[in-house]
């Protein structure tokens, strides 16, 4: 069975250019990675769950703030590992404050084989990036979303 995730590509217009909101995964594996490490806010679709509802829920969990508005379907994107990410675009709320972002947490055994569970945020930071910057920061399997976003916006 193919794993499906759902997420939101949040965008805003700055002057005549667009920026997108990307999140950096928390935890020790991603701590020193930057290029090709960022993602749209997203997460797994639960069995029987509506995919847009999952995208909205997961985004709220990762950002700690609700996102609401007019969602436009972008498409489905197969990741290198086989997972499918279903994405919608949404224009950012002008008052979306990145300093207010508080991600949910997960636990893993850290350091490995220590027997200690350590808690990490799902997202350790978020940022606004131009489409050019986002093409470098985004995971490779999510980069086609940027071209699809431009098609929907123009």
Image (cartoon, grey):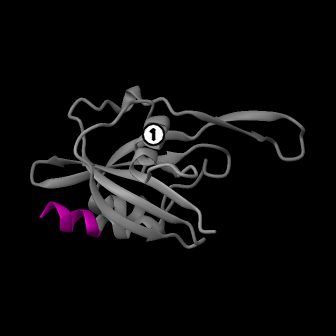
User: Magenta span has 75?
Assistant: no
* Residue 67 in the image, given as x and y percentages of width and height: 33, 36
The residue pinned by badge 1 equals 57
Residue at the (27%, 69%) spot, across then down: 147
Q: Quadrant of residue 109?
A: top right
User: In percent of the image, x 47 and y 62: which residue is there?
Assistant: 85
Q: Residue furthest front?
A: 48
Q: Residues within 10 Å of mark 1 (few under 14, many from 20)?
A: some
Q: Which part of the image, by quadrant, shows the C terminus?
A: bottom left
Query: Magenta segment, which residues?
Result: 147-154
Tell me where residue 38 appears, x and y as whole percent.
47, 54
Query: On the picture, is 17 further left or further right than 136?
Result: left
Locate residue 120, reporting x and y percent. Answer: 65, 36
Q: Is residue 60 left or right of residue 114?
A: left
Name above or below for residue 17 compared with residue 53.
Answer: below
The answer to whether residue 13 is left or right of residue 135 is: left
Element at label 1: helix
């Amino acid at each position: 069975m193919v794993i499906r995730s759902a997420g939101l590509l949040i965008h805003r217009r700055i002057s005549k250019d667009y920026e997108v909101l990307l999140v950096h995964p928390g935890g020790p594996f991603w701590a020193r990675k930057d290029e090709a490490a960022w993602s749209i806010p997203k997460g797994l679709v639960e069995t029987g769950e509506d995919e847009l509802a999952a995208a909205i829920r997961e985004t709220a969990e990762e950002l700690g703030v609700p996102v609401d508005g007019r969602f436009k379907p972008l498409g489905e994107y197969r990741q290198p590992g086989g997972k499918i990410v279903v994405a919608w675009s949404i224009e950012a709320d002008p008052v979306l404050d990145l300093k207010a972002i508080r991600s949910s947490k997960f636990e893993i055994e850290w350091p490995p084989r220590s027997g200690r569970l350590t808690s990490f945020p799902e997202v350790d930071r978020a940022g606004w990036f131009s489409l050019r910057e986002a093409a470098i920061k985004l995971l490779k399997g999510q980069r086609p979303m940027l071209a699809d976003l431009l098609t929907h916006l123009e």
